[in-house]
Structures are given as structure tokens and as C-alpha cells.
Image (spheres, grey):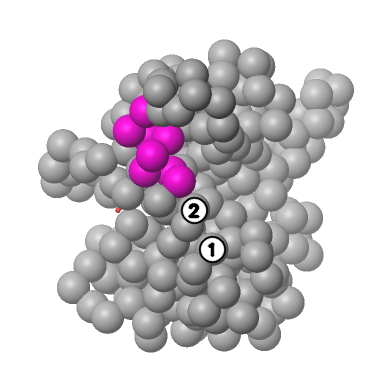
Amino acid sequence: MTVAEAQTRTDVAIALERVRARIAAAEAANDRRPGSVTLVAVTKTHPEAAIREALAAGQRVFGENRVQEALAKYPALKAAHPDLALHMIGPLQTNKVREAVALFDVIETVDRPKLAAAIAAESRRSRQDGIVRHPACFVQVNTGEEPQKAGIVPADADSFIQQCREVHGLRVEGLMCVPPVAEEPSLHFALLSQIARRNGIAALSMGMSADFEIAIAFGATHVRLGAAIFGSRPPAVAGSE
Ligand SMILES: *Cc1c(COP(=O)(O)O)cnc(C)c1O
């Protein structure tokens, strides 16, 4: 790094460097290959300026949980950075699938047959348009079986994954979970890892700012971090999750 760069290092750049060091340490501590864990920088509620700081610091994988917010922030950034990968990490309504398939490279929240069918139909339609959009899909599993939370329940996961692949032709590359807030996350991470193994799924998106090192110990390939990089968000509005 040059002196000039060092002088302009931002809070986001400094936080990213710390987080990357913690990820590398967790990889090493758990005999994981260096670089085997992808950092998804979660930018929901944070302005485009913060995303630009992260881009300047070399970050290329980002996550957003709302289609509208992502549409407001990302199209120009993606045009300027063709290697930027955007992950959808929030609940996806079927009426937003067209926009989501056009914008997101990975949809981490595939959790019900109707949504799987809608993503597949939109992928087919994009082929006819000549702009092929076939996003990688992660199946979200509601490991805590919380009624208010999105995700397929563990008992239905195997058949749903099979349906996504064989009926809908989706690229199911990963599983994702958000453990219950008040519970020890390890059991949830272990359960997600088991479901992935028996279905031949390589990617595991689990672990957030508070628990990503535990998730890495349980095999996370993607950790989704917001607060640890961009600082805390305003308190969530009830029902917004
Ligand atoms: C907001 C969010 C994150 C990031 O949470 P932090 O605690 O800020 O790291 C990860 N995953 C999902 C699904 C989220 O909505």
C-alpha cells in the first residue's frame, strides 16, 4: 500500500481488513483451505458511498435483503464492476422475481415451490430474450422451525432440493440459514451442514457478524456480515425480516 492510500483508508477499509484477518484465522484454526470462505458484505440500509468504499478496498461480493433497495443502489455499480457478485439474502416475493433474476447473481433464499417455479420460469424467459440469467440458488432452511421465519423446514429439505433440481432445473449450489437469535448457533450450523452433505451441496451460507467464526468451524463457505464491516444499523422495524 502506498502512503497516499494509507492516508485515505476509510473505516470500512479498516473494518474489512480486520474481518478478513478473522476469517483467515478461523480457516487456519479449522484446517480449512485459505480463501475457502467467501465474505458476503451485507449492505442493507447502508448508502452507496459505503459500498464504494468496500469496492475500493477490494470487496466484490455483496448481499442485500430487499429487491427495491438493491435496484436503487446496484445497477450502476455492477456496470462499473463486472466482477461484482450480488447475493439476495432476504425473503423474495414471487412478484419481484423478474427484477431479482435480472439483478442478483445468487439467490440465497429459495424456500418454497412457488418461488422455485417462478425463478425457473424467469430464467427460461431470459433465454428467449437472449440475455441469459440463470442465477445460482441456495435453499434457505428454517433450522429453528420458527413460524415467523422464512425457509423450508428441515424435514422437507431433501425433497424440496430434489424438486428444485429435477423439476425446475435450478442450479442449487448452496444452503443458507439464519439461526434463532436466542439460541446457540452450533446445532443449527451442524444441521445445515448435514443436509448439504447428504444432498451433494457444496456451499453453506451461515454465520453473521456475531457468530461467523463458529459457522466457519462448522463448514461455512459463505459468511454474511453487515455490522462488522459497516457499523450497526438502525433498529429493524418489526416484521421487516
Ligand atoms: C442483515 C443480515 C445479515 C448481516 O447481519 P449482521 O449481524 O449485520 O452481520 C446476514 N444475513 C441476513 C439474512 C441478514 O438479513
70 or 113: nearer the eye? Answer: 70
Note whether 178 is above or below 121 in the view shown.
below
Stretch in magenta: 10-17
Magenta stretch holds residue 4: no
Q: Which residue is drawn at 42% across and 53% down?
A: 19
Magenta stretch holds residue 11: yes
Q: Name the residue under label 1.
A: 24
47 horizontally vs 60: left or right? left
Magenta span: chief secondary structure:
helix
85 or 170: nearer the eye? Answer: 85
Is disc 2's CB within 8 Å of ligand 1?
no
Q: Position of residue 163 (x, y in %)?
A: 68, 66
Note whether 191 is above or below 168 in the view shown.
below
Q: Which amino acid does label 1 sit on?
A: Ala
Q: Residue at x 32, y 38 (%)?
A: 230
- Category of crowding for the residue at label 1, using alpha-carbon neighbours closer than 10 angstroms: few (below 14), some (14–19), many (at least 20): some
Q: Where is residue 114 in the image (x, y as percent from the top left)?
A: 55, 52
Q: Name the residue under label 2.
A: 20
Q: What residue type is labelled 2?
A: Arg
Is disc 1's CB within 8 Å of ligand 1?
no
